[in-house]
Image: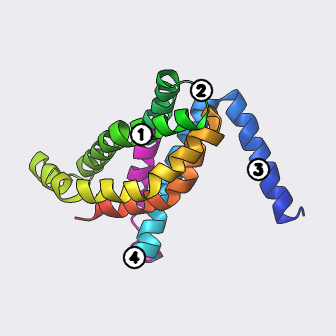
Amino acid sequence: MLPRAERMAGLWKSYQRLMLIHPWKIQILTAGTLVGVGDVISQQLVERKGFANHSVKRTVKMMGIGFFFVGPVVGGWYKVLDRLVPGGNKTVALKKMLLDQAIFSPCFLGCFLTISGTLNGLTMEENWNKLKRDFIDALIASYYLWPAVQIANFYFIPLNHRLAVVQVVAIVWNTYLSWKANKM
């Protein structure tokens, strides 16, 4: 049996190889999986539901949001952002972070909360009220976390790995979002 560090290194090499061959597919799979992980953490550690009361249906819904919304939208946004603001110096990273946080983040959060509300069966009025109640809190929370992450991401990380870096950090964020989106 290989030591744990060697197994992890082997997994990372496999992931990088797959990213070279199928970057779009792997980014989407990574996003969906990690949104699901965030929901499991939310249900188990934040909401303390225990395994007997864990909602697999909710986790599958959150993974679906990750696969079909988060992965494609965030991955696509990074490609657009790279075309809008080409380069890789500190000024470019700052411009990308400002665009990301001022334009993308509010739109993304509004859509995320609306999609999750719709999948949870909320009516348009209930969804609107939930959005009014939760959107500003979620946006403020995002501003505590994401600007620093995105500066580092845009400055140090190649385009095809940005979504993965964001999703690893986003395990914490996804836990918060899952709790926020599913709190009725």
Residue occupying image coordinates x 57% and y 39%:
154
Q: Residue furthest left?
A: 125
Indicate which disc residue 87 carries.
Answer: 2
Q: Nearer the viewer, mark 3 or mark 4?
A: 3
Residue occupying image coordinates x 58% and y 38%:
90
Q: Residue furthest right?
A: 1
Provide the residue span drawn in magenta. Answer: 51-68
Calculate the distance from the C-alpha at mark 2 to the C-alpha at mark 1. 15 Å
Calculate the distance from the C-alpha at mark 4 to the C-alpha at mark 2. 46 Å
Q: Nearer the viewer, mark 4 or mark 2?
A: 2
Residue occupying image coordinates x 50% and y 32%:
78
Q: Nearer the viewer, mark 4 or mark 1?
A: 1
Tag 4 secondary structure? loop
In this view, the residue in front, 36 or 136, is 136
Tag 1 secondary structure? helix
Amino acid bearing label 3: Leu
Amino acid bearing label 2: Gly
Earlier-in-chain disc, 4 versus 1: 4
Q: Position of residue 170 (x, y in %)?
A: 50, 54
- Mark 4 touching mark 1, by CB under 8 A? no
- Mark 3 touching mark 4, by CB under 8 A? no
Question: In terms of secondary structure, what is the magenta stretch mainly?
Answer: helix
Earlier-in-chain disc, 2 versus 3: 3
Residue occupying image coordinates x 23% and y 47%:
118
Earlier-in-chain disc, 1 versus 3: 3
Indicate which disc residue 49 carries.
Answer: 4
Describe residue 175's horizontal placement relative to residue 156 as left or right. Answer: left
